[in-house]
Amino acid sequence: MHAEKPVTAIPRHVAIIMDGNGRWAKARHLPRVAGHRKGMEAVRVVVRAAGELGIDYLTLFGFSSENWKRPEAEVSDLMGLLRLYLRREARELHAQGVRLRVIGDRSRLAPDIQDQLMGVEAMTRDNTGLTLVIALSYGGRAEIICAAQQVAEDVKRGVLAPEDITEETFSAHLFTGDIPDPDLLIRTSGEKRISNFLLWQMAYTEFVFIDTFWPDFDRAALLSALGEYGQRERRYGAIVA
Ligand code: IPE
Ligand code: IPE
Ligand code: MG
């Protein structure tokens, strides 16, 4: 008899690459921003569902360091939606017991957005429900370089010896220093790549790629991905009897 695998295994940390807003809009002959707008609604739905399902950490890739290469008008639309999301959702997130964390190079964001982010993080800091991590102006390689620079500074100051640099001390310097690695990564829209997301942290993450465009992602799509995750056998290089 093999042990029954629980289909309802709830991963502690789910990360999502929310992709396909532009193609969702294009298929409807709408401007790309319409896809981003609908995508923002999907974020609300999924954050609520994740909290209700007992997921501890949800990390959403909102804007990559490479997304700055997009036309100015699109970047400005996305930043406008981010402002709107924070303004509209801050109270609701707080009421749901969500703790907001932002990872990425905030210095590139507009000062008013930086202030909004700090405000919501401060307001929700002591909440004990879902930790919602939003990756903004985020790049995995840049994050690793930033951690390497901090570690090098510690060595230069004589507070850390090179032989004491371990996986633990190094990962403590990442933006996600106090956040467990993702158990499950979901990418929507049919693309099968990680696009510079959480490179270090995803060493043993399970990947689920789905064809749905992000604006159509909902609670049922999340449950379906969790179901697939529940079928996976995580071995971490060892042999599982
Ligand atoms: C994801 O949708 C949102 C961001 C990357 C900000 P896209 O805008 O990448 O949509 P597609 O991939 O062009 O369809
Ligand atoms: C990844 O999507 C970034 C976000 C979802 C925020 P992209 O649409 O930017 O990725 P590529 O360009 O297809 O790899
Ligand atoms: Mg895309």
Image (cartoon, rainbow, N blue to C red):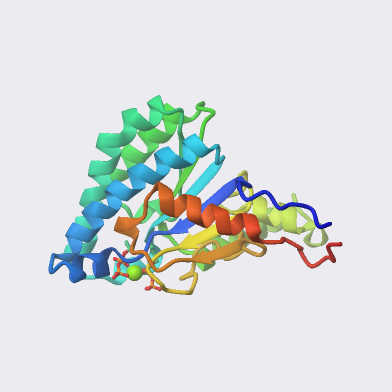
Q: Position of residue 145 (x, y in %)?
A: 56, 65
* Quarter of the image with the N terminus in it: bottom right
Q: Position of residue 71 (x, y in %)?
A: 21, 70
Q: Nearer the viewer, residue 228 or 72?
A: 228
Judge from the rendering whether residue 33 lies leftward or rightward of residue 225; answer left or right: left
Q: Nearer the viewer, residue 154 or 230?
A: 230
- Image point (33%, 67%), residue name: 67
Task: Classify the position of ligand 3 by quadrant: top left, top right, bottom left or bottom right.
Answer: bottom left
Residue situated furthest front in the rendering: 1
Judge from the rendering whether residue 37 lies leftward or rightward of residue 156; answer left or right: left
Q: Position of residue 57 (x, y in %)?
A: 54, 43
- Image point (37%, 52%), residue name: 107
Asked if one can make out residue 212 in the rendered structure from this viewpoint, the answer is yes
Q: Nearer the viewer, residue 145 or 204?
A: 204
Q: Height in image: 57 above or below 105?
A: above
Q: Position of residue 210 (x, y in %)?
A: 44, 66
